[in-house]
Image (cartoon, helix red, strand yellow):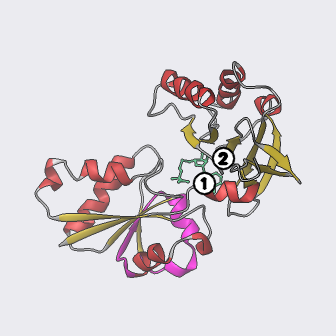
């Protein structure tokens, strides 16, 4: 049976990939992915055939992977973090339904990776150590009204929140807009933090209050953490108590 593996590569460092993902890449004939991630793979996979498409041509990238699998190639599609968290895993299944591929017997295997919420939380301390939500501020694929609704619901439920895609060139004020929505019900002193370039050169982390976060400009390589009502900063790290010391 023909097969495509969809693998998450974690935040960007080989030591933070699973052995399962590394084994799949070792066995691959073709690695498909966004160029930035193909470059992050580095020396170990330099002899592999690598295929890519520019950003916003994700569906075409998936079709490329399917066409290689049809030719009996061992194909691995890589995504940053976890392929099933704002990644390509679901799109791969959807593309598999298209008439061009529907009659091919191609199995899709998904290999998990460490998502930015998890790797970033580890850098910051333990900000997600209770119920939490993950919300992306990108309105490319989600209407902004729905993002606002989810932010309000997360605040209402007193969830700790990991925010992905907090900014981009066109959306430099989205984090500010998100903080304003949270500040409707959350106190300005709420403990927050953010981590830039997790697992990559230049990794750095900061803690701040929600009011301070509102006025901070972050870039798209940053994951933002909003604490819940019990979160606090201990020794410069952001901690959400599990409740053991109640
Ligand atoms: N599938 C990825 C997420 C892709 S969405 C995952 O599971 O991690 C892209 C967003 O993820 C970025 O805007 C940023 O908010 C976050 N992100 C991914 N990798 C990151 C890294 N190495 N450092 C900081 N943030 C990262």
Question: Do labels 1 and 2 touch, CB within 8 Å?
Answer: yes
Q: For the residue with label 1, is its CB less than 8 Å from the closest atom of ligand 1?
A: yes
Q: Secondary structure at mark 1?
A: helix
Residue 137 occupies which quadrant of the picture? top right
Tell me: residue 213, above or below residue 240: above
Q: Secondary structure at mark 2?
A: strand
Q: Earlier in the sequence, mark 1 or mark 2?
A: 1
| Disc number placed over residue 8 in the picture, else none | none
Tell me: residue 122, above or below residue 140: below
49 lies left or right of 210: left
94 lies left or right of 53: left
Q: Residue at 51% x, 30% y: name it.
A: 139
Q: For the residue with label 2, is its CB less than 8 Å from the closest atom of ligand 1?
A: yes
Q: Position of residue 175 (x, y in %)?
A: 68, 31
Taking the magenta stretch, the answer to whether it contains residue 46 is yes
- Which residue bears the numbered disc 1? 116
- Which residue bears the numbered disc 2? 223
Q: Look at the image and give the residue range highlighted in magenta.
A: 27-48
Residue 159 occupies which quadrant of the picture? top right
Identify the image quadrant of the N terminus. bottom left
Q: Crowding at label 1, few (<14), some or many (≥20) Cα neighbours within 10 Å?
A: many
29 lies left or right of 203: left
Q: Identify which residue, 138 or 229, lies in the foreground.
A: 229
Q: How many marks?
A: 2
Q: Residue at 35% x, 49% y: name it.
A: 90
Q: Residue at 19% x, 49% y: name it.
A: 97
Q: Position of residue 151 (x, y in %)?
A: 58, 28
Residue at the limit of the structure toward the left, as seen here: 103
Q: Crowding at label 2, few (<14), some or many (≥20) Cα neighbours within 10 Å?
A: many
């Amino acid at each position: 049976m023909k097969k495509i593996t969809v693998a998450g590569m974690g935040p960007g460092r080989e030591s933070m990939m699973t052995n399962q993902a590394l084994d799949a890449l070792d066995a691959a004939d073709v690695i498909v992915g966004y160029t930035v991630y193909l470059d992050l793979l580095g020396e170990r996979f330099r002899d592999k055939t690598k295929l890519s498409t520019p950003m916003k041509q994700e569906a075409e990238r998936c079709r490329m992977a399917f066409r290689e699998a049809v030719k009996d190639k061992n194909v691995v599609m890589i995504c940053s973090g976890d392929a099933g968290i704002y990644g390509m895993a679901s799109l791969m299944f959807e593309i598999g339904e298209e008439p061009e591929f529907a009659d091919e017997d191609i199995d899709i295997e998904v290999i998990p990776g460490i998502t930015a919420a998890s790797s970033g939380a580890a850098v910051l301390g333990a900000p997600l150590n209770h119920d939490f939500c993950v919300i992306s501020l990108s309105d490319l694929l989600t209407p902004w009204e729905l993002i606002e609704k989810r932010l309000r619901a997360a605040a209402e439920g007193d969830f700790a929140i990991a925010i992905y895609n907090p900014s981009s060139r066109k959306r430099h004020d989205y984090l500010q807009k998100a903080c304003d929505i949270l500040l409707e019900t959350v106190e300005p002193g709420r403990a927050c933090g953010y981590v830039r370039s997790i697992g990559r050169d230049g990794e750095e982390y900061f803690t701040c209050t929600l009011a301070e976060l509102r006025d901070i400009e972050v870039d798209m390589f940053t994951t933002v953490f909003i604490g819940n009502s019990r979160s606090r900063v201990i020794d410069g790290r952001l901690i959400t108590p599990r409740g053991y010391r109640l």
